[in-house]
Amino acid sequence: MFSNDKNIEIIASLGNEIKRYIQLREKQIKLDATLILSQLLAAIALAAVIIILLGAVLLVLTFALSSLVGSWVGSEALGYALIALAYALLAALIYFKRNAWIKEPIVRFVSALLVKNDENETNEANEPNQKL
């Protein structure tokens, strides 16, 4: 009888430990997701600020270049039109190269965040075994 009571206590304790492990694992997954999301949002915010600042600089330089080209060709309107054409050609080039220049780097960045986090998780899981 004493053996059965001890077994029941051990099984109850094991059940409690499994429940605690699942709760800790759930908390770790939430923390990992929060870390990944915060890194991604920080990168997006930084990119947005840089794009806005570079856009403002590019706008001013475009006006200056358009005026310069206009003085070379003899018509300021033609200078603006030539710069607009150059931007249209640049936009077409970016459109045709969008996978290599835009999509693939973003996919690599996001997957690197996820894989880096998985590798850290794997290393942390293996470290206690190595110390034993």
Image (cartoon, grey):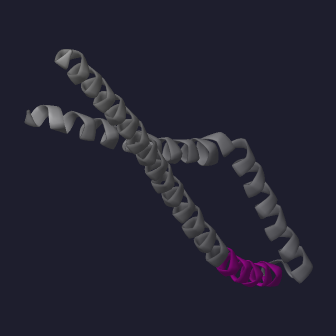
Q: Which residues are magenta?
A: 55-71
Residue 75 seen in this snapshot: no
Chief secondary structure of the magenta portion: helix
Residue 95 seen anywhere in this rendered image of the structure: yes
**Residue sitting at 91 percent across and 78 percent down?**
77
Tell me: 111 left or right of 56. Answer: left
User: Is residue 67 rendered magenta in the image?
Assistant: yes
Q: Quadrant of residue 7?
A: top left
**In the rendered view of the protein, which quadrant contains the N terminus?**
top left
Inspect the magenta stretch and tell me whether residue 113 lies in it.
Answer: no
Q: Looking at this view, is 22 or 41 the one in front?
A: 22
Q: Position of residue 19 (x, y in %)?
A: 40, 35
In the picture, residue 46 is in which quadrant?
bottom right
Which residue is depicted at the point 85% across and 75% down?
Answer: 80
Residue 45 position in % (x across, y down): 59, 68
80 vs 13: above or below: below
> Vertical placement of 93 versus 122: above or below?
below
Left-right relation of 46 to 26: right
Residue at 77 percent across and 78 percent down: it is: 69
Q: Nearer the viewer, residue 98 or 15?
A: 15
Q: Nearer the viewer, residue 128 or 70?
A: 128
Q: Which quadrant of the rendered structure holds the C terminus?
A: top left
Please state which of residues 98 and 79 is positioned toward the viewer in this rendering. Answer: 98
